[in-house]
Amino acid sequence: MPAPQRVTRVALTAAARAIAEDEGIDAVTISAVATAVGVRPPSLYKHVAHRHDLLRLIADDAARELDEDVTALAGSATDSAASLAAIARAFRAFSTRSPHAASLLFSGAALSAEPQSDGMVALTRTLLNAVRAAAPGDPLPAARTLTAWAYGFCTMEQAGAFQLGGDVDEAFEFGLTTLADALTAHR
């Protein structure tokens, strides 16, 4: 009898994320991920306690990836308003290529999980630092506003909800400019 295949956290995360993006979040199950990594479902319990742990792996991986994107774009911005715009554009690009991971990342379950994942801590810190540089006072309300607007826009865009004609890219840039101007107005 051949020795059982070893499962790495990286392989487990990649399999769970691929299933989520190909088939949707509901398809991410212990059984589906076990099959994808080539083990029997009971073997997966050595790595995760339940399905929610798989979803947390996806959210953490997504947060790390988005933080890398945001850091790269925001770091090249010429001023604080441009940095906020870069963050929103990075989120839109990420949301386009990984819509299910993006929705999971900003779901209440992923955000309220304790302890916070390293990826989510890094992403939150990057976002708060960029907002702190752009807007006066407590950065949390401004960060929440920027995140909610970008997430809402991207969610509607992916759902095909913009049916009134016009250029969706232009609408995104209009909303982004308006929001960035409002957040930096009292600086």
Image (cartoon, grey):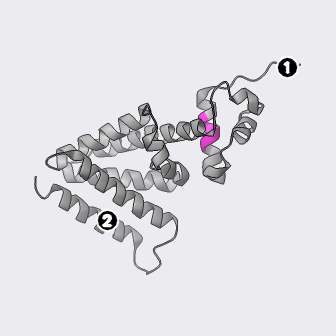
What's the residue at 65%, 39% (across, down)?
Answer: 15
Q: Is residue 97 left or right of residue 137?
A: right
Q: Earlier in the sequence, mark 1 or mark 2?
A: 1
Q: Is residue 15 magenta?
A: yes
What's the residue at 47%, 78% (across, down)?
Answer: 163
Helix, strand, or loop for circle 1?
Answer: loop
Q: Is residue 156 left or right of residue 184?
A: right
Find the distance from the CA under tag 1 to the CA under tag 2: 56 Å
On screen, residue 50 above or below 79: above
Q: Residue 19 in the image: x percent, y percent?
A: 65, 46
Residue at the right extreme? 1
Residue at the bottom extreme? 164
Q: Residue 122 in the image: x percent, y percent?
A: 36, 35
Residue position marked by numbered label 1 in the rendering: 2
- Range of residues picked out in magenta: 13-17
Question: Mark 1, mark 2: which one is toward the viewer?
Answer: 1
For residue 173, which numbered disc appears in the image? 2
